[in-house]
Amino acid sequence: MPLGPPVNTEPATAPTGTAYVLDSSFDINDDAVTRTYNWVIAMFMFFSDGYNRSYITINGQTPGPLIEANEGDTLVINVQNNLNDNQTSSIHWHGIYQNGTQYMDGVPGATQCPIQPGQNFSYQFKLEQYGTYWYHSHSSVQYTDGLMGPLVVHSVDDPLVRGTDFDNEQVLMVYDWYHDEASTIVNELLSSDGYEGTSAAPSPQSGLINGQGVYDCSLLDDDSSANCTTPTSYPVFNVETGKKTRFRLINAGSHAQFYFSVDEHTVQVIEADGTPVSGSGDLHRIPFHNGQRYSALVDASVGSEGDGFWMRFTMNTDCFSWVDDTLNATALAIMRYGSSSDSDTDPTTSDWSDTIGSSCVDLDEGLLVPVVEKDAVDSQAVVAFDSAFGTISYNGEEYGRFFVNDTTYTNYIYHPVLLGVASDGTDYLDTEENVTYAVFDDDVWSGDIIVSLTRKDAALDHPYHLHGYDFQIVARGTGELSIADAANIEYNTTNPLRRDTLVIPGGSYAVLRFGNDNPGAWVLHCHIAWHLAEGFLGMVISKPNAIADIDFPDSVNDLCSSRPDFVDEDTTEPGRRRRRRALPPNVAGAQPEVSPAPKAPLLINKMPRGHSAWSRRRGGSSSL
Ligand SMILES: [Cu+2]
């Protein structure tokens, strides 16, 4: 199929109105069906928060279409990549186990080769879980530019029942937004100069809620403000007077942890990353970080028909290394009683008085008790991941990178590890030294992953996401936890919280226990898109012998064989390591400059104490 224009000039659309409202007519008792979606990925201009720039869209929409299905259904998503400039793509289904369809996890370099421009790939998998999930590109930083959307799975087994526990449902996708394209930011971030002079993750400009926001253009200098028109109204979300709404919160962001609150309304958390929970009590604010989801129950019994209350989505800037003065840190929306979409009458309500936390941490897990109880079983294997920020030297220049167990992830997108292990067994891992692996053998049915943020990465907090599983958080603590010491600590094995994304604060560790029952190559990474781009990823290999028995569909093998001849087999991603001005022009048919392939051992220089990248950390310590 021929590609369209590089950027479509007509504006993209946001999922306004009822696009993300779950309809009560959706029958969760239906027999299992196959649901088919046809998506075209392309770039459109848009101005969601008032600032005009390009977005990566699905069928012209950003964020993308809601997928709503029942447990037991099979999803078929035909993805047509119509991006130009040789941009390959992929879609990852965040939190979906993919047990038996490991090659559909959507991670180039781990579970598949990427989808070529002009190519169509069909993701097909069965849903064997329920809850609030989302999907996003796992190619470069495309999701930061808008290529993502919500995925909600119902089940007759879900203890949270519409009509009993809540009356209405609404998805709220919330994310930090950048006025520079993410591809531009990441190219500079990975260069020796960094972005805005630093290799620390960038500060966003605003927050979007379901693709809508209000940016104060006066924060920009004259050059940029010519491209910016401050919107005159806020997004409106309706609630039924006297009824309970389940807001399915998804942090689809790339850096910012958000606090969610509604003026004069307490909220209860009833689901965390697909796990129904109880015990949160009445909260004023809910913090949620990149990749995390919560269902927040709001009882519309405070006001009366037509009343409006501010909904606040406030970034926790304590999670940032530096804050730009162009940041609008709070995204506002109007929660309006009844069906009026009036966006002209602003609420006059006041925020809760409790301050936004001064640390970058999860909602207390003690408040999130799984309703479907599951005690942790003893683990038979334990691995330890630590992380570090440092630099690599290449051709006389220094580049800021993250390291997991002293290896900075270099993603060879045409060497998917799953396919390599399937053909060569774990010997394959000895030939690919671009990532840290942890192998959980076939006879292990429960494993522990220790993640420590202490040794050389004690200054930052990271939201960790594991693919292929949810895990039980069986321990947290301060300092570093070695494998030897892990035998001597106390574990919380009584119905611990299960989730797939957690925040690990700097200077601490967490122990993640998982059932090793899903053969595959599962990435474990920081969900801050910028940290991932800088190499913050390790890999968990589950049941290597079972991987050898996987029967790959032809379509998956074809992705690898359809690499064009002019594209190097050792292409890495994200590429284009040079400064923006030095980048070669994107000529049709030409491949952007490939990153140097650091297969030889790299000289690793740990970043010295007080380096400028961290000394800009706002209000925090700069010590490493
Ligand atoms: Cu991180």
Image (cartoon, rainbow, N blue to C red):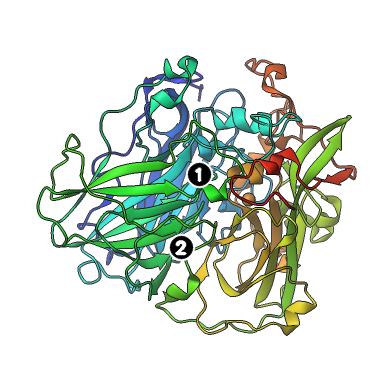
Which of the numbered marks, if any, corresponds to residue 122?
1
On the image, the x and y values in percent for residue 428 come to 81, 55
Q: Name the residue nearer the viewer: 474 or 231.
A: 231
Determine whether the residue tagged by mark 1 lies in a helix, strand or loop: strand
| x and y, in percent, of residue 149 in the image | 42, 45
Give the Cα separation between the discs numbered 1 and 2. Answer: 26 Å
Above or below — where is 48 with respect to 520? above
Q: Nearer the viewer, residue 443 or 320?
A: 320
Front residue of this view, candidates 419 and 255: 255
**Residue 485: mark:** none
Residue 276 placed where, x, y %? Answer: 39, 71
Residue found 35% across the figure and 22% down from its top: 229
Which label was assigned to residue 273? 2
Horizontal side, residue 455 vs residue 171: left or right: right
Image spot of residue 104 (x, y percent): 56, 52
Q: Are marks 1 and 2 in contact (CB under 8 Å)?
A: no
- In the image, is the residue at mark 2 within 8 Å of ligand 1 by its beta carbon? no
The yes-or-no answer for disc 1 within 8 Å of ligand 1 is: no
Asked whether residue 563 appears in the rendered view, the answer is no
Residue drawn at 71 percent across, 46 percent down = 535
Disc 2, SS = loop
Identify residue type, mark 1: Ser
Q: Amino acid at mark 2?
A: Asp
* Image-quadrant location for residue 162: bottom left
Q: Nearer the viewer, mark 1 or mark 2?
A: 2
Q: Is residue 241 left or right of residue 148?
A: left
Q: Earlier in the sequence, mark 1 or mark 2?
A: 1
Q: Tell me if I can see residue 258 in this picture.
A: yes
